[in-house]
Image: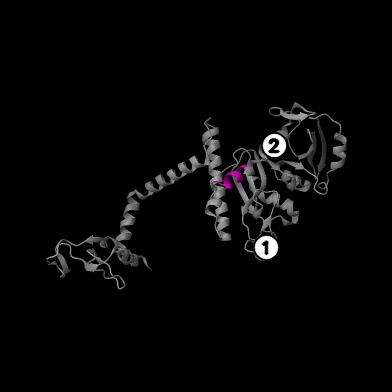
């Protein structure tokens, strides 16, 4: 995917689910309660922040990862589980100075530093899940921001492995939002947001990193919503085989990518109204039909098809009707009978139908339409 599509300057790393309900028939089966579809296989995915096109996926194998062979040891496993994941998922983007948006599940200081060493900036949300991420004095920061007006910003800078990074705190209407950055500034960005404070709506101005974090964090979710919607291929196909279900997931991602890219490049960039998934599918099917017709109508394709028919004898096989007053085939002519529409028993051993049709290859070979199809099908058997 990275060879045919180049993401914009901001990308999002998040999770996607391939739905499956049986724990005993799915390698890597997981239950992620916070997801709309919590049962199945989890994929880590990277999506373009503006187009919502997914450019990289990785299956979470867990305990079902092979214990031996070339895939037994993940790349960058020596860096740690989360840090290795960040490096694998962003490897195609190294050195591009892009910004990677990360939710709190990927907020690891060592990972942020390793990305910066490889030419990628990042913004990650910081949340306390039992404890604060290593190296983050979250309780002290929140205590410092208490009783501050809504919209107040405070930033502290630190350095690790000669890489500078910043911890920002933003007082929102209900919570104090903490983030970790290796880029950006506290300059205002975008339009003010509405917040309710003491019963009144007030305008709150977001700073640059925070505004772009909120802009790009839902890119993967937007792709998932298209893929798992009421018209989704996965739901309509619903394969009962686990391997085929993973294929359905990949095909659904490709369709959602094409739909998102079309709406961005053909609609938004040209200031046109976005189209629905149903209209997009109609355009896609029409395009595939026209493309197939263009291939089948080329002289080379027609000649190749004709050569295949001749080599298999298909051109000599056609179901035709015997002439009127025709009875038995005598080898070079029909025997004349008094009955105008003389019928003959089908030559298939178990068929009792009486017909007037025979194969062009042998005038004495009277066949019904069903056994004529079987007669021709024999030519294609290896």
* Residue bearing mark 2: 214
Q: Is residue 122 left or right of residue 156?
A: left
Magenta highlight on residue 358: no
Q: Quadrant of residue 187?
A: top right
Residue 74 image position (x, y, % from top left): 68, 58
Answer above or below: position of 199 versus 348: above
Residue 150 image position (x, y, % from top left): 80, 30
Q: Is residue 99 left or right of residue 380?
A: right
Residue 18: image tag: none
Q: Is residue 152 left or right of residue 273?
A: right
Which is the main secondary structure of the residues drawn in magenta?
helix
**CA distance for labels 2 and 1:** 35 Å
Q: Which comes sooner in the sequence, label 2 or label 1?
A: 1
User: How many numbered callouts?
Assistant: 2
Q: Residue at x 34, y 65 (%)?
A: 377
Q: Quadrant of residue 22?
A: bottom right
Residue 4 appears in the picture as rendered: no
Give the magenta-colored segment's residue range: 222-230
Magenta highlight on residue 226: yes
Viewport quadrant of the C terminus = bottom left
* Residue bearing mark 1: 64
Q: Is residue 362 left or right of residue 11?
A: left
Using the image as rendered, state which of residue 1 and residue 290 is in the foreground: 290
Q: Residues within 10 Å of mark 1 (few under 14, many from 20)?
A: few
User: Looking at this rendering, what residue extends furthest in the bottom direction?
Assistant: 349
Residue 275 image position (x, y, % from top left): 52, 37
Q: Residue at x 36, y 50 (%)?
A: 296
Q: Residue at x 34, y 52 (%)?
A: 300
């Amino acid at each position: 995917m990275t060879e045919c599509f180049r993401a914009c300057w901001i990308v999002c790393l998040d999770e996607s689910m391939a739905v499956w309900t049986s724990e005993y028939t799915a390698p890597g089966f997981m239950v992620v309660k916070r997801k709309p579809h919590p049962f199945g296989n989890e994929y880590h995915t990277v999506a373009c922040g503006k187009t919502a096109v997914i450019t990289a996926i990785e299956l979470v194998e867990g305990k079902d990862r092979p214990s031996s062979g070339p895939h037994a040891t993940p790349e960058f496993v020596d860096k740690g589980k989360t840090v290795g994941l960040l490096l694998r998922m962003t490897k195609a983007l190294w050195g591009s100075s892009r910004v990677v948006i990360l939710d709190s599940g990927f907020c690891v200081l060592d990972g942020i530093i390793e990305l910066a060493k490889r030419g990628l900036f990042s913004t990650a949300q910081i949340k306390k899940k039992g404890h604060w991420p290593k190296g983050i004095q979250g309780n002290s920061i929140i205590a410092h921001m208490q009783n501050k007006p809504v919209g107040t910003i405070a930033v502290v800078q630190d350095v690790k492995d000669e890489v500078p990074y910043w911890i920002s705190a933003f007082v929102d209407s209900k919570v104090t939002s903490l983030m970790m950055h290796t880029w950006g500034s506290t300059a205002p960005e975008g339009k003010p947001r509405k917040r309710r404070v003491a019963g009144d709506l007030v305008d709150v101005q977001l700073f640059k990193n925070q505004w772009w974090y909120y802009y790009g964090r839902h890119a993967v979710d937007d792709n998932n919503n298209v893929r798992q919607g009421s018209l989704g291929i996965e739901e309509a196909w619903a394969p009962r085989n686990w391997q085929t279900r993973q294929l359905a997931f990949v095909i659904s991602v490709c369709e959602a990518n094409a739909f998102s890219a079309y709406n961005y490049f053909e609609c938004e960039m040209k200031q046109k109204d976005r189209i629905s998934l149903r209209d997009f599918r109609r355009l896609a099917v029409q395009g595939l039909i026209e493309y197939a017709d263009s291939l089948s109508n080329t002289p080379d394709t027609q000649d190749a098809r004709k050569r295949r028919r001749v080599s298999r004898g298909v051109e000599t096989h056609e179901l035709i009707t015997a002439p009127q007053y025709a009875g038995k085939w005598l080898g070079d002519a029909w025997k004349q009978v008094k009955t105008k529409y003389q019928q003959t028993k089908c030559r298939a051993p178990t068929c009792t139908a009486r017909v007037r049709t025979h194969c062009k290859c042998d005038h004495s070979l009277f066949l019904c339409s069903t056994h004529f199809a079987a007669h021709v099908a024999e030519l294609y058997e290896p």
